[in-house]
Amino acid sequence: MKNLQRIENELKLKKQLDLLREPIEISQRDGKYIIVNGKKIINLSSNDYLGLAANDGLRRKIIKIQEKYSISSSSSRLVTGNEKIIREVEQYFASFFGYEDAMFFTSGFMANVGLISSLFSAESTIFYDKHVHASVVTGLELNQAKKIGFKHNQTSHFSKRFAKHANSENWVILESLYSMDGESADYRFWESQKDKINLIVDEAHAYGILGEKGKGLFGSIADIAVGTFGKAFGYTGAFLLLPKIVRTYLENNCKAYIYTTGISPANAMVGKFLLDQIATMDAEREIVRNLSNHLRNLLRNEKISFQGKYHIIAIEIGDEGKAIQIQKIMQNDGFFVFASRFPTVPLGKAILRISLNPLISPKDLEIFVSKLRKLL
Ligand SMILES: Cc1ncc(COP(=O)(O)O)c(C=O)c1O
């Protein structure tokens, strides 16, 4: 390869600024543990919020499903990948969550980029929370709509911007539970705006783990909702919940759906199996709620600043170098906590992102917080 100087320079600069990403290598996962450099450490950074991906009994059942159904769609859904069974599972999801229809994608990133890049025209105005996920931001960059960001979770700022910029076709994009700070959007406010906007809500971090039977924080208030199998479902793939007419529109316009191999029948059936499991997991949701309360009390007692009401807790660190240092020391001390840095969070506002699941014990959290207190 030629002309690598620019690439080298950019990486060097990232390293100097403590912004270089160097993912740890995990040799094995074992319940709440991961094994890194031969050492077993507690994973406080998994999005497997119900512990489903770590469940061996469930894994055996999933393998049985995969033995029974095709493991590849072998083409786009628009060519020969649209098996009846996938449509049936999509309709099953739609009815479970209270929507007219559903549409599967191979990941949440694809679902968001696909939806947001293709649904709008130059006549549309999109108001979006400035902390929406990178997949939404990427979708926004690809469409022709007028885009108006508002300050994170500040409904009064939205109202001001709406009064100034509203057009004939107005949309709002939110997350129900924000992936980095663990704060939730105010569904009562957004419900009250429904007469003037169309609402898109990404429930990636809420479906499965929050709400009645895991139906998320917004119920079916949103016009279009986004869910992924990669978090509480403990699997891979994603779904949009949407009106039939929007589904047909996307089938005709969404490149991330048209020009890619569709989800496999096996994965769709696994999704259905996991949805049925999740609906029955009130006890696990309760355990995680209690763990979250416990962790927040421990942090408050130690006067450690944090954000987050539910299973995602963001411990405020600020300096990127310090966040990385704490991650490394904690790793040696038996815990994996993820130091999230720019551009995932704003510059100078690095956090330790803790995510909980029912396999973690209250005692684990007590040990973690006492070690963290000493470090801080
Ligand atoms: C809010 C949000 N939406 C979408 C995604 C993408 O989902 P997936 O991991 O299935 O690609 C993520 C993943 O990090 C996310 O946090």
Image: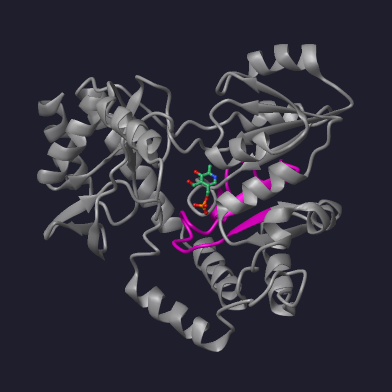
- Residue at 55% in and 61% down: 237
Q: Where in the figure is residue 3, as x and y percent of width and height?
A: 41, 40
- Residue at 89% in and 26% down: 168
Question: How many numbered badges does the structure rendering display?
Answer: 0
Q: Where in the figure is residue 246, as x and y percent of width and height?
A: 82, 51
Q: In terms of depth relative to the viewer, which is nearer, 100 or 71?
A: 71
Q: Is residue 195 above or below residue 252?
A: above
- Which of the 4 image quadrants contains residue 163? top right
Does residue 234 show up magenta in the picture?
yes
Q: Is residue 66 above or below residue 333?
A: below
Is residue 274 shown left or right of residue 345?
right
User: Magenta segment, which residues?
Assistant: 211-240
Is residue 329 shown left or right of residue 89?
left
Q: Is residue 215 visible?
A: no
Q: Is residue 73 visible?
A: yes
Q: In terms of depth relative to the viewer, which is nearer, 59 or 247?
A: 247
Q: Where in the figure is residue 92, as x and y percent of width and height?
A: 69, 67
- Residue at 51% in and 54% down: 208
Colour scheme employed for the rendering of this structure: one colour
- Which of the 4 image quadrants contains residue 14? top left
Q: Is residue 105 above or below residue 291?
A: below
Name, please, the residue furthest toward the right. 168
Our reading of the magenta stretch's main secondary structure is loop
Does residue 210 show up magenta in the picture?
no
- Which of the 4 image quadrants contains residue 87? bottom right
Q: In terms of depth relative to the viewer, which is nearer, 103 or 296?
A: 103
Q: Is residue 69 above or below residue 286?
A: below
